[in-house]
Image (cartoon, coloured by chain):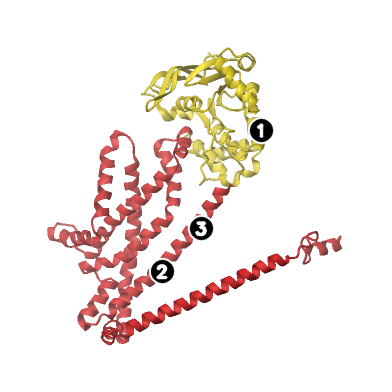
Chain colours: A yellow, B red
Amino acid sequence: MSDAPVLRMEAVRKTFGGSVVLRDVDLEVAPHTVTALIGASGSGKSTLLRCANLLEEIDDGAIWLDGEEITDPRVDQDAVRRRIGVVFQAYNLFPHMTVLENITLAPRRVHGVSRAEAEERGRELLERLGLGGKAGEYPDRLSGGQQQRVAIVRALAVRPRLLLLDEITAALDPELVGEVLTVVRDLKGDGMTMVLATHEMGFARDVADQVCFLDGGVVLERGSAEQIFGDPQQERTRRFLRRIVEAGRL
Amino acid sequence: MTLTKDESGAETPDPVDTYTPSARRLERERHKRARSRRATAIAAVSTLVTAVVLYLVVVNAPGWPRTKETFFNGQYAREALPKVLEGLWLNVRLLLICGAAVLVLGMLIAVARTLRGPVFFPLRFLAAAYTDFFRGLPLIINLMIVVLGVPALRLQGVTVDPVWLGGTALTLTYSAYVAEVFRAGIESIHPSQRAAARSLGLSNRQALRYVVLPQAVRRQVPPLLNDLVSLQKDTGLVSIGGAVDAVRAADIIVGRSLNYTPYIVAGLVFVALTIPMTRFTDWVTARMDRQRAQEGTT
């Protein structure tokens, strides 16, 4: 039972207008594992994550979270989202709230946690991620790396079953990428189940248990990190990785 | 120890920096000062010339002595001022009550217009029809319909007080304007904010209440204040129903004396009342622009 996948997708299809963004996508994410989605921009990585969180409605196929089909129209979508944490590329912090208010909003309003308790856990998490002194600041006073770490704390504050990370370092200055990736590594150490879309191939290779290469809305190749980065089977995967190496990103 | 402290605390805070302005900088500053002196002088002269010309044109107009007597009579002004101020108290009360009602109603209509899903179609439709209708209907006609039409119905239990009816008409029109301001604010909040809120498990309503509306309202403070300034002067229109506000108070004296000076007095009193509010609006707007500029740089 404990090995049953946290997230499972089967034959997921998603179109925007006339263009097919996801085509027959299957995915299984085992508990306490990290899955990295790699691929060029527009290959469908972000859309896949948004579908998993029901921010986008899929056209066909099905998605299960802990064995429950969440794409069933009778399912309470808010209840599903409560179990999934999301961190966005552009942080999406709430600019009118302090760091601590950002973090305690969902625990208090959605999970009914008392203010004192929510704040205590919030401060604890901030401390752990090296943001101890920032609780009272507004997001625009923080660096990009700090904002993204706050966004991670916000997602963690509700103790999610699954964490989705959507290109969380893409908007950061190079020298700030490291501090965010360290956090993700630590989370893996804690056993958090994660799916991340990323352009940081070195990081994906390092942290992922499973790597999926998306191309044109299809999972073209999947396997362990060593396999995908060391011995890719598909010509397109090889070409993609070669370009990445040439760009000095691996 | 005390010596170094004295040294660092004295007039040279940074002893390493022995900067003295270069000749180039001094020359530049001299030039800028001269230029700004010239600009001030030109502005002063042109203002003066304009004022003198206007004065001469008005004073030498063939009907000036007569106009002066009818519109700028000091004696009537002194007589009118206390009555007008008394009436103004009604305008102020109307502003406060209608302003509050307008904000609440406007917000409800705006929210109704942003509701999604087929279930809310009737609400959305009604809200849209309401704003379309009352934004298009001239306020003066709205006032006449409500203030004169409703009493004509002779409904039991419905007030015929022109103040209440006039206030209702103002609220109807202005809540349509304000609803549009709120709606623009709601729509200006980037969808990613709503997505972030929903991804945390907040319901649509919670996302609106805790994330979208607070930001939307903050962003719309300047245009809202603008509408309130407008409402403030339009409270003078309730006089058409006979409510004794500042305008009506002037009207009464005019009717008796056939001298229009009280209107001028009432007009000036309204201007005096709106100026602080417009200045406040400017101040808030400038402050928000500064904040936004700062956000832009980070």
Alpha carbon distance from label 1 to label 2: 54 Å
Q: Residue at x 63, y 23 (%)?
A: A207
Q: Which chain carries label 2?
A: B
The answer to whether B278 appears left or right of B250 in the picture is right
Which residue is denoted by mark 3 in the rendering? B287
Residue B187, x across and y down, in percent: 39, 44
Secondary structure at badge 3 equals helix
Q: Residues within 10 Å of mark 2 (few under 14, many from 20)?
A: few
Residue A96, x across and y down, in percent: 51, 47
The three-letter amino acid code for the residue at tag 2 is Ile
Which residue is denoted by mark 2 in the rendering? B275
Alpha carbon distance from label 2 to label 3: 18 Å
Q: Mark 3 lies on which chain?
A: B
The answer to whether B76 appears left or right of A223 in the picture is left
Pointers 2 and 3 in contact (CB under 8 A)?
Answer: no
Q: Is residue A39 above or below residue A170?
A: above
The three-letter amino acid code for the residue at tag 1 is Gly
Residue B219, x across and y down, in percent: 45, 51
The three-letter amino acid code for the residue at tag 3 is Arg
Q: Residue at x 43, y 80 (%)?
A: B49
Residue B177, x across and y down, in percent: 32, 54
Q: Is residue B235 visible?
A: yes
Which residue is denoted by mark 1 in the rendering? A178
Q: In this view, does A243 lie above or below B179?
A: above
Q: How crowded is mark 3: few (under 14 residues within 10 Å), some or many (20 or more)?
A: few
